[in-house]
Image: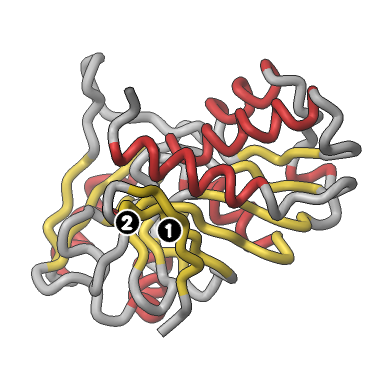
Amino acid sequence: MLSLQDQMKHAVAEAAVEQIRDGMILGLGSGSTAALMIKSLGKRIKNKELRDIVGVTTSFQGEVLAAELGIPLKSLNAIGHIDLAIDGADEVDPNFQLIKGGGACHVQEKLVAARANRFVVVVDSTKLVNRLNLAFLLPIEVLPGAWHQVKIELEAMGAKAELRMAQRKAGPIVTDQGNLIIDASFKDGIIDPINLELQINNIPGVLENGLFVNLVDQVLVGEINNDEVSVRDLVKA
């Protein structure tokens, strides 16, 4: 039997797929909830419920899954636009600002989200927060030769910063782009995501950080109420 959290993820993934129409170019996100969305999409394509779909993936893992399910894929450089991008998030604040990058895919995820005409975020209710970065670390992708320099700069900004280490191998996590990840936390959380995103990205050696600012059009939230699973369409504060 599925856990309550998994039931929420399934429900919100299905709700997102309901927004897909024939002929769309789709941004296919990363993470556990996005994977459920990709599986549902693959099933509908196989059953001919959806036609002429093209996917643009945000991670190598998502590319492998979509290919196995027979979803036609193109690279970001091969398309002129994305109709709809669907992805998860590690944290969502009341203004629809996000932290992403728990899976170290946030560079490609942000590229896809920025290209999309509509960006829909799918989460379970545990991902909703009043302020970003109080519980979840902010991922920052850095060039391998610059990680220590970037760490010093982040600490000068008041952050605790650590190189993300791999769990099942010696050494650090390496991204799909061949870079490293520094995870940062600020004592009082992130009060001003808009300015902090720019400030961090201006540090030499930083490729991109996991703050997704002013990109989200809709947030679908899986919830449990009285032991019943439901999906709430969140309203921006």
Tag of residue 6 = none
Q: Is residue 185 left or right of residue 211?
A: left
Q: Position of residue 8 (x, y in %)?
A: 39, 45
Q: Which residue is mark 1?
A: 221
Q: Is residue 205 in view from this perspective?
A: no
**Rendered position, 173 above or below 168:** below
| Residue at 22% from the left image edge and 41% from the top image edge | 163
Q: Is residue 49 left or right of residue 210?
A: right
**Rendered position, 186 above or below 27:** below
Count neighbours of disc 1 (C-alpha within 10 A) and say few if under 14, some if 14 to 19, many if 20 or more: many
Tag 1: amino acid:
Val
Q: Position of residue 133 (x, y in %)?
A: 22, 63
**Rendered position, 190 above or below 221:** below
Q: Quadrant of the N terminus?
A: top left
Q: Quadrant of the C terminus?
A: bottom left
Q: Is residue 190 in view from this perspective?
A: yes
Q: Secondary structure at mark 1?
A: strand
Q: Along the line of sight, which residue is nearer the eye, 140 or 123?
A: 123
Tag 2: amino acid:
Ser
| Residue at 61% from the left image edge and 58% from the top image edge | 113
Tell me, yes or no, whether the two marked residues, 1 and 2, touch with CB atoms within 8 Å. yes
Q: Is residue 202 left or right of residue 190?
A: right
**Rendered position, 96 above or below 33:** below
Q: Position of residue 189 (x, y in %)?
A: 18, 70
Q: Which residue is mark 2?
A: 125
